[in-house]
Amino acid sequence: MRVRVQAEVDTDLAPDVIRAALLDFTDRRVDLWPQLDPDTFQVHWVRETSAEVTEGSPRPKVWSREHYDWSHPTTVTWTAIESNFCTPGSYMSMNIEPLHNGGTRVSVTWDRTAANLRGRLTLAVVAIGGDRLLKWATRKSLADIAKHSDDG
């Protein structure tokens, strides 16, 4: 079972703030992205335009070792290497385009293939929620980033 969902969200956040949050692989990551499970988060390595990180969520209890690539100036893509729910090669991608007002248009692609029953159940929820769920989750994440950028 493969689920591919795309969504676009506009935000007042500047592109560099969003990109910095996506590429923050420090211990602060679980604060910037509170949906991440702190017990699962592990950085394996970080290079100039790539990283390998294991991260997941507590509910549903899923994890994935992801290869992050930000070699393209406006796009960050993370691709599963191994996971307890999706197949290797499954990915998410976020394109961050500046708007004339100083904000950003964020285009998200969620493309995952289930590896097992846990994956099929997780992906079924995403399939049912579709782009509405992805827009909601993206707006929630952007609000979390804005909260922490105001703190900093």
Image (cartoon, grey):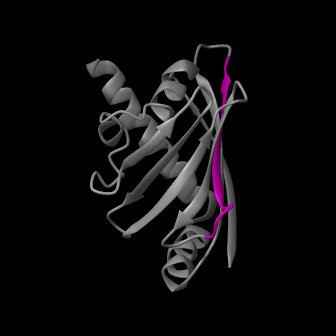
Left or right placement of residue 95 versus residue 59 in this view: right
**Magenta part mainly helix, strand or loop?**
strand
Q: Is 134 colored magenta in this rendering?
A: no
Instruction: Point out the image quarter for the N terminus.
Output: bottom right
Magenta region, residue range? 87-99
Q: In the rendering, at what x and y percent does residue 66 appear?
A: 55, 52
Q: Is residue 14 visible?
A: no
Q: Is residue 6 above or below residue 82?
A: above
Residue 63: x %, y % from top left: 44, 63
Residue 21 quadrant: top left
Return the residue nearer the eye: 149 or 44.
44
Inspect this view and state whether residue 76 appears.
yes
Q: Is residue 130 above or below residue 106?
A: below
Residue positioned 59% across, 48% down in the render: 67
Residue drawn at x 32%, y 29% as measured from the top left: 147
Question: Which residue lies most toward the top here?
Answer: 101
Q: Residue at x 50, y 32 (%)?
A: 23
Residue 94 in picture, x, y percent from top left: 63, 40
Q: Quadrant of the C terminus?
A: top left
113 lies left or right of 44 = right
Number of numbered markers: 0
- Seen in the image, is 39 located left or right of residue 126? left
143 lies above or below 1 = above
Along the viewing direction, whichever of 33 and 52 lies nearer the viewer: 52
Q: x%, y% of residue 138?
A: 51, 45
Q: Quadrant of residue 57?
A: bottom left
Q: Furthest residue to the bottom? A: 117
Nearest the eye: 75 or 9: 75
Residue 94 part of the magenta segment: yes
**Vertical placement of residue 131 versus 52, above or below:** below
Residue at 70% x, 30% y: name it. Answer: 71
